[in-house]
Image: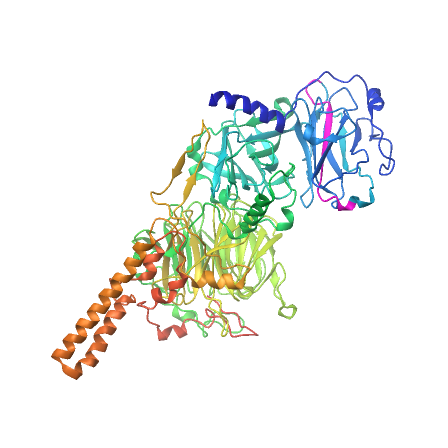
Amino acid sequence: MAGLVNNLLIPFLVFQNICFGFRSPLSVFKRFKDTTRSLSSECLESDQPVISLGLSDFALDIRMPGVTPKQSDTYLCMSVPLPVDDEAYVVDFKPHASMDTVHHMLLFGCNEPSSTENYWDCDEGTCKDKSNILYAWARNAPPTRLPKGVGFRVGGETGGRFFVLQVHYGDISEFRDKHKDCSGVTLHLTHQKQPLIAGMYLMMSVNTVIPPGEKVVDADIACHYKRFPMHLFAYRVHTHRLGKVVSGYRVRNGQWTLIGRQSPQLPQAFYPVEHPVDVSYDDILAARCVFSGEGRTTETHIGGTANDEMCNFYIMYYMEAKHAVSYMTCTQNANPEMFRNIPQEANIPIPVKSDMLKMTHGHHEATKGTDKSSLLQQAKKEEEEILDQDFHIEEAVEWPGLDLKLGQVSGLALDPENNLVIFHRGDHVWDENSFDSKFVYQQRGLGPIEQNTILVVDPSNAKLLHSMGKSLFYLPHGLSVDKNGNYWVTDVALHQVFKLGADDKEPLLILGVALQPGNDKNHFCQPTDVAVDSVTGNIYVSDGYCNSRIVQFSPDGLYVMQWGEGTETSLGRARPGQFQIPHSLALIPDFSQLCVADRENGRIQCFRSQTGEFIREIKHKSFGRELFAVSYVPGGLLFAVNGMPYPGEAEPVQGFVMNFSTGEIIDTFIPLRKNFEMPHDVVASEDKTVFIGDVHARAVWKFASTEKMEHRSVKKAGIEVQEIKESETIVEATSRNNPESTDPLKKQEKQHLVQQASTGVSFVLITTLLIIPVVVLLAILVFIRWRKTTVYGADGEHKLDSSSGRILGRLRGKGGGGLNLGNFFASHKGYSRKGFDRLSTEGSDQEKDEDDGTDSEEECSAPPPPPAPSSS
C-alpha cells in the first residue's frame, strides 16, 4: 500500500511543482495580437507587448493587467502566449516590480495555463500540464542573469508555448488608494540558435515525515547523474515554515563541493552559484533540508498547503545544445550512508531577521495564531542555535605535547597526513633589542638558530616524527603546509619567505632579500604569514609588522599583485582593506576567499583571493583589541584566538569557534593546564581537533570536541521512523554557550552558570556524587582534628592547617588524582566549562617564568594609545 501511495504522490508533486509539457503550436504571430488581453491604461507605458529588436530579436512584455489585490499575501497569475510558432530562446529578463507592493514574482513556461481569464488566483494552479520555472524575482534578492550564449528554449516542437506569471503581493497597504498594478517582466528573445541551452534540475523529497516537537529532522536527496556534462550557475531553495536551511552539493570521488545553501525563510529567488560547478557522468547530486518540528502538535508531511512541508532544491544549469535536456528531477536518496560525510555547514542555519520572515513562502497562511506565535519564536532563536551540532571545545588534558621542550612557538600547521607541524625559535627570542628604528635586525652576531626549528609530531601522542630547519632561521614566524607537504615559512629577522621540501636541506624557493626590509615587489618588512592556494598554487604573504599589505605571487614566485594600506588612527574605526599588522592568513577554498587576522584592529577581514576585493569583516566585542590568528576548517567552521586584554579591559584571552557563513561565535575555549599568555597561532582539523601555540608560554595545547552528534533520518515507509545515532548515549543540553548574546544579562548567565545536562544523568546521581566527597572530607577533617587533639594537644592546630590545606589543595586539582568538579560536569554534552574556570585552573602547575619579560616587547600588546605594535 505504501508503495502505491508513493507512486501516486511523486507524479502529483512533480505536476504541482515544476512541470512542463507540450501542446500543438500556435499558428502565426498574428494570432498573438488577436488573443492579447486588454490592459489597464493606468499603468501601461505602451500598448505594444511585443517590440522588435532587429531582424532576429524581439522583446515580450509580460505584465499584470492592472490588478488591485484585496488582501495581503495574495497570489495572482496571468498568462501570455509565445508570439511566434518557431523556436526561440529567452536570453535575458528585465523585472518591473515595486518593492513596496510585490514580494516576489515567478515566471513559468508551459503549454496550457490553468485559466484563460485575464488573471486568476494562483490557488487554481499555474499550468494544467507540466511547467518549468524560467525566472524568479524577489525583494532584497539578486536578479537572475543568464551567462552569455545561454538561453531557455521555447516554442517549436519541444519548447513551451505559454508564459505564466505569478506575482505575490505581500503587504497591500500601498493599495489603499485603489490604484492598479501591472508588475511583471520583459523578456529578451532571439531566433538565433544558442550554443548553450538552460534547464532546470529539481531535487525534491517526497516521503519526509516531521514528528511533532522534533528538534532536528534531516531530509536527504541524492541521485547519480547519468547524462552529458552540465554547468550549474544558479540555485533556489524552497520549504515552508519548518525549514531551517537547505544545501545542495556535487559529490565526486567522495569530495563534497557546495552548489549553494540558503535559508528558505529568505526571499525565494534564484541565487547565483558563487563558484561555477560542473557535473559530469556518474557524479552524485545531493541535497539536504533541515527541519524542526518544534511548535507542531501533529506529524507534518510533504504536501502543497501551508500546514504541509516541502523540501525542494532547484538548480539552474546549461548544456551544449546538441545534448540539452530542459528539465530533470531527483526524488530519491540513492545512498543514505554518504550523508554521514556531508559538510557540517549543511546543519548550520542562516540567521533571518524578523522582518524577513513575513510572507516569504509562496503559500497562503493557514495555521492558527498560536502556531504562528510559536513558529516566530522558534525562528527568532535561529541566531543562537546551531542545529544538530552540539559540541564544546575542551583541552585534551591527556595529551603530552604540552611538555615538549620548545622555544617561542610562532607557527602551527597540519601536513597532508594530519600530523602537527610546529615552527619555533629555539634559543632565540624577539625582544626590544632585536631591531633598530628602521626594522633592521641587530642580533646577527648570534648567528642562525642551531636547533631544528620545524618539528613534526604525532597529533595523538606528541611523538616526534621528523625535524629540520637547523641553521636556517633567525626569528621564525609564520608557517603553512601545501597540499604536496612542502613547508612555507616566514622569518621576520631575515624579512623573507621560504619554501622547504620535507627532506630538503636547502630551500626550494626564497622570496625577499635577506636582512633588507622594504615594501616593493622584491622586499618585505617583517612578513608574518604565508598561505598557498591548493587549487591555483598562488602564494599569499601577509606583510607585515612594518608594512600593511597582502602580496600575491604566482606558483613559481613571480609578483602578481598586492592590496591593503595602513590604518589611519585619526579616523577612528579602520576601513575595509586597511591593516594594522596583518598577522595570520586562512585560505577558504570552498569560497575562493582569503581571510586575514588584522591583529591590532581586532578583526578578521575576508577578500576574494583572485582579486583582493573586500568581502566582509568579522568583528566581535569579545575579540578585544587584538585578534592574533585565524584558521578555517572545510565544512564551514572558523577558529581564531585573541590577545591579552589591555589594562582595565575585561575581554579574556581565549579561543573562538565561528560559523564562517554568518560570522557568529559558536563556542569559546580556554586551557585547563597552564594559562594562555600570548597564544600566537591556531590550526584545526575537520574533526574539530584544535592546536594553539603560545610564544610566551612556549607551549602547544591540544583541544578536542566533546560533541555527541545525533543524526536523525526520519523516513516514512508505512509509518516507520528510523533513527541513526552516532553515539550510544545522546545527552542534549538545555542551553548553549553563546558569548555574543544580544542580551547582556543572558550573556552573563551563559558565562557564569553551570549548564546541566537534561537527560542521561539523573539529578539524584549528580547530587549523590556531589555529597559523597563533602561527607568524606568532613569525616577526614573531624578524624584529623580528633587525632591531633589527642596526640599533640594545642600544637596540633598548626599541623592541622597544613594537613587540611594539602587535602583541599588536592580537591582543587593541585595534587594528581584530586576530584575536579569542572572535569566531572564538562564530560557531559552541551556543558560550558566557564562556571568552573577558576576551580579547574587554580591548581595549574604553571609557574610564571620571570625571564619571559625578555621574550619581546613586540610579542606583547602595546600600552593604550598610541599603541606601539607588538610582534610575535
| Quarter of the figure with residue 820 | bottom left
Residue 178 horizontal side relative to residue 586, left or right: right
| Quarter of the figure with residue 9 | top right
Tell me where the magenta segment starts and ends, as one range: 157-174
Can residue 643 be seen here? Answer: yes
Q: Is residue 301 above or below residue 462?
A: above
Taking the view exactly as shown, the residue that stands out farthest to the bottom is 794
Q: Is residue 332 above or below residue 517?
A: above
Percent position of residue 711, x then y:
42, 40
Percent position of residue 458, x then y:
32, 51
For this rendering, which residue is in front, 673 or 174?
174
Can residue 476 be seen here? Answer: no
Residue 871 horizontal side relative to residue 756, left or right: right
| Quarter of the figure with residue 695 | bottom left
- Is residue 171 highlighted in magenta? yes
Tell me what residue is drawn at x 65 percent, y 37 percent: 364
Percent position of residue 655, x then y:
44, 59
For this rendering, which residue is in front, 466 or 5?
5
Q: Give the mark count.
A: 0
Percent position of residue 587, x then y:
51, 50
Colouring style: rainbow
For this rendering, which residue is in front, 439 or 778?
778
- Is residue 435 highlighted in magenta? no
